[in-house]
């Protein structure tokens, strides 16, 4: 479904109480990407032989090769980015914009708009 335009949602009744949570999720995902990207970049800067003589990290029941950890971290950033893009597209779509304008006022609307600006 990636990259596809959704159809069949025109007659759906969107519940405004879920909009704020969707916005918060999108913001959390964005922050998660930022942190994961920093961790990923920093981890890639450290030569493996400066981390571990056996090329692995962990212990006490769970170890992971450094090369696998680096691959998983890069994949994690990519997955978070895909999720965040989808959530941002959702909360900035026209159907939610109408819901937002029709159901929220004052401080609540300002809070939502402030959160949306961070995306």
Image (tube, rainbow, N blue to C red):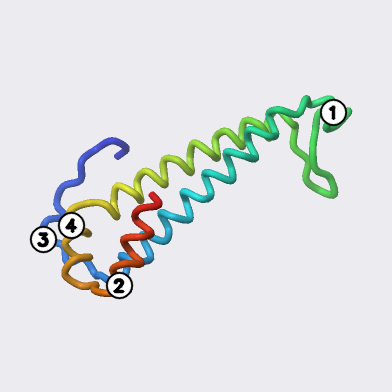
Which residue ends up furthest to the left in the rendered image?
Answer: 11
Counting from the top left corner in percent of width and height, residue 27 is at 43, 55
The span from disc 4 to disc 2 (Cα, nearest Å) is 14 Å
Number of residues whose C-alpha sits closer than 10 Å to that of mark 1, classed few (under 14), some (14–19) or many (20 or more)? few
Disc 3 element: loop
The span from disc 2 to disc 1 (Cα, nearest Å) is 50 Å
Mark 2 vs 1, N-terminal side: 2
Q: Nearer the viewer, residue 63 or 57?
A: 57
Mark 4 vs 1, N-terminal side: 1
The span from disc 1 to disc 3 (Cα, nearest Å) is 58 Å
Lateral position of residue 4 relative to residue 62, left or right: left
Q: Residue at x 11, y 60 (%)?
A: 11
Are the residues flagged by discs 4 and 2 in contact, CB closer than 8 Å?
A: no
Q: Quadrant of residue 41?
A: top right
Q: Which residue is mark 4?
A: 95
Q: Which residue is mark 3?
A: 11
């Amino acid at each position: 479904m990636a990259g596809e335009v959704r159809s069949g949602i025109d007659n759906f009744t969107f519940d405004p109480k879920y909009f704020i949570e969707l916005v918060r999720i999108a913001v959390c995902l964005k922050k998660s990407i930022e942190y994961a990207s920093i961790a990923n970049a920093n981890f890639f800067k450290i030569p493996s032989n400066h981390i571990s003589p056996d090329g692995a990290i962990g212990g006490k029941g769970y170890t992971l090769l450094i090369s696998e950890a680096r691959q998983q971290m890069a994949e994690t950033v990519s997955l978070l980015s895909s999720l965040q893009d989808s959530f941002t597209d959702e909360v900035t779509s026209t159907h939610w914009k109408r819901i937002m304008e029709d159901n929220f006022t004052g401080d609540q609307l300002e809070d939502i708009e402030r959160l949306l600006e961070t995306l």
